C-alpha cells in the first residue's frame, strides 16, 4: 500500500538520490490508425524542454514506497497509489529488488495534465533514482523495458534529448541535436485528458481514412541545421484538431502567439499547453512578454530545447 506522505523531506536524508527530469513537447505527432489493442501507431519527434520536475528517492524500510508531491498542480496529481512514480518504483522493486523500499518526493515544475508527459517523467525519474538508491546499476535497456510497460511516453522521458518515436511512441531512435531552440510555453488552468483527445480523433477520422504515420519531410533537417524558421514550418500535430474541438479557447492562444511573431505555433501533445517557437533567446523573451500581456490568467514560460536529465547533488550519507 502506498502511504500518503513521506515523514521528512526526502532530499535532506542521507543516501538520497535526486533526479531532474524535463517535460517534453512533440515537434511532430503524426497519428495513424487505431490498432486492435486500442492504441494508435504514431510517428513522432519528441524533444525535452527545460521545464522539469525534481524527484528525490530516499531510503525506506523493505517493501515500503511512499510519495509526497509539492509545487504547482500537486493537488491534481491524484492518490499516491495511482502516482506513476510510485508504480514505477514498485515495478522496479518487484522485478529486481523485492526487499527494497523508497520515500519519493516530487517537486512539480511540469504542468499537470498539460500534454507534456509530467507523470511519465516522474515515472522515469523514479526508475533512475531507485536504480541508484538500491545499487542495482541496471543497463538503460532494462529500464527502457520497464518504462514501456508503464506508459507510451515513459521510455522517451527516461532518455531525454531528442528522439524519433514509433509504435505507441515507445520504439525510440535518439537524434543528436547540436543546436538550442528557444520556445515559449503557455499553460492552461484546466487539464485535458489524453484518452478523450484520442477518442475525438477517432470520431473525426473513420479508421480506413487514416494513413500510416510519417514524420514530416524537413523536420529532422531543420533540427540538424538549427534553423528555427524551417522547424516552425515543419511542425505538425494531428491531435491539434481534436484538442481544439474539446478546448476552443486554445485557438485564441495559438492566434495570440502567431500575432506575437512566433515562427511556429502548436498545441503540445494532446494539449492544452501551447508551444511557440522563437528565433532566438531575445525573441523568445519578447514573444513571452506579449503573450503574458494578452493572455491574463495563463502562465507563460520561456524554455530551451533539447534539455537533458540531470542528477543534482542530494543528501549523501
Ligand atoms: P499523458 O501522459 O496522459 O499525455 P499529460 O502529459 O497530459 O498526460 P500528466 O501531467 O502526465 O499529463 O498527467 C496525466 C494524469 O496522470 C493526471 O490526471 C494525473 O492525475 C496523473 N498522474 C499520475 N502520476 C502523476 C505524476 N507523478 N505527476 C503528474 N500527474 C500524474
Image (cartoon, rainbow, N blue to C red):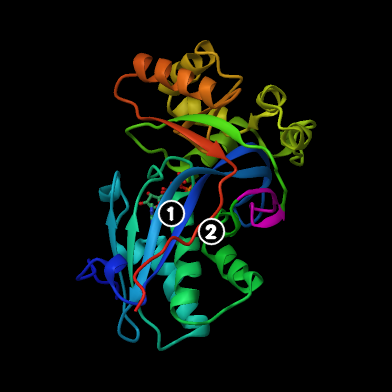
For label 1, being within 8 Å of ligand 1 is answered yes
Query: Observer-nearest residue: 16 or 268?
Result: 16
- Whether residue 166 appears in magenta in the rendering, the answer is yes
Which residues fall within the magenta stretch? 161-173
Q: Which residue is mark 2?
A: 151
Q: Is residue 149 above or below residue 120?
A: below
Q: Residue at x 49, y 49 (%)?
A: 22
For label 2, being within 8 Å of ligand 1 is answered yes
Q: Secondary structure at mark 2?
A: loop
> Disc 2 to disc 1, how far (Cα)?
9 Å
Name the quadrant containing residue 103: bottom left
> Where's residue 162, x and y in %?
65, 47
- Whether residue 311 appears in magenta in the rendering, the answer is no
Q: Residue at x 22, y 66 (%)?
A: 5
Query: Observer-nearest residue: 290 or 211?
Result: 290
Asked if the residues shown at circle 2 and circle 1 are in contact, with their CB atoms under 8 angstroms apart, the answer is: yes
Residue placed farthest to the top in the image? Answer: 259
Q: Is 248 positioned to the left or the right of 145 in the image?
A: left
Name the quadrant containing residue 237: top right
How many circles with numbers are drawn on the protein?
2
Disc on the earlier residue, 2 or 1: 1
Q: Secondary structure at mark 1?
A: helix
**Mark 2 packing: few (<14 Cα in 10 Å), some, or many (20+)?**
some
Q: Is residue 316 above or below residue 284?
A: below
Q: Is 30 positioned to the left or the right of 48 in the image?
A: right
The main secondary structure of the magenta stretch is: strand
Amino acid at each position: 500500500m502506498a502511504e500518503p506522505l513521506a515523514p521528512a523531506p526526502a532530499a535532506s536524508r542521507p543516501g538520497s538520490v535526486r533526479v531532474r527530469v524535463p517535460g517534453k513537447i512533440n515537434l511532430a505527432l503524426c497519428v495513424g490508425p487505431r490498432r486492435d489493442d486500442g492504441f494508435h501507431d504514431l510517428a513522432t519527434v519528441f524533444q525535452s524542454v527545460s521545464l522539469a520536475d525534481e524527484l528525490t528517492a530516499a531510503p525506506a524500510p523493505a517493501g515500503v514506497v511512499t510519495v509526497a508531491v509539492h509545487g504547482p498542480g500537486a493537488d491534481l496529481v491524484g492518490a499516491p497509489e495511482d502516482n506513476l512514480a510510485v508504480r514505477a518504483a514498485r515495478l522496479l522493486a518487484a522485478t529486481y529488488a523485492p526487499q527494497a523500499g523508497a520515500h519519493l518526493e516530487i517537486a512539480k515544475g511540469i504542468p499537470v495534465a498539460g500534454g507534456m508527459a509530467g507523470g511519465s517523467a516522474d515515472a522515469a525519474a523514479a526508475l533512475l533514482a531507485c536504480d541508484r538508491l538500491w545499487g542495482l546499476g541496471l543497463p538503460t535497456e532494462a529500464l527502457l523495458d520497464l518504462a514501456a510497460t508503464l506508459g507510451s511516453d515513459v521510455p522517451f522521458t527516461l532518455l531525454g534529448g531528442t528522439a524519433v518515436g514509433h509504435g505507441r511512441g515507445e520504439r525510440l531512435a535518439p537524434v543528436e541535436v547540436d543546436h538550442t531552440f528557444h520556445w515559449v510555453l503557455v499553460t492552461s488552468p484546466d487539464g485535458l485528458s489524453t484518452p478523450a483527445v484520442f477518442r475525438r480523433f477517432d470520431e473525426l477520422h473513420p479508421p480506413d481514412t487514416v494513413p500510416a504515420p510519417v514524420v514530416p519531410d524537413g523536420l529532422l533537417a531543420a533540427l540538424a541545421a538549427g534553423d528555427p524558421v524551417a522547424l516552425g514550418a515543419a511542425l505538425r500535430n494531428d491531435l491539434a484538431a481534436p484538442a481544439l474541438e474539446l478546448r476552443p479557447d486554445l485557438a485564441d492562444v495559438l492566434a495570440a502567439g502567431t500575432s506575437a511573431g512566433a515562427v511556429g505555433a502548436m498545441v503540445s501533445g494532446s494539449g492544452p499547453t501551447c508551444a511557440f517557437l522563437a528565433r532566438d533567446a531575445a525573441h523568445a523573451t519578447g514573444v513571452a512578454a506579449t503573450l503574458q500581456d494578452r493572455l491574463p490568467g495563463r502562465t507563460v514560460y520561456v524554455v530551451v530545447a533539447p534539455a537533458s536529465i540531470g542528477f543534482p547533488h542530494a543528501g549523501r550519507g
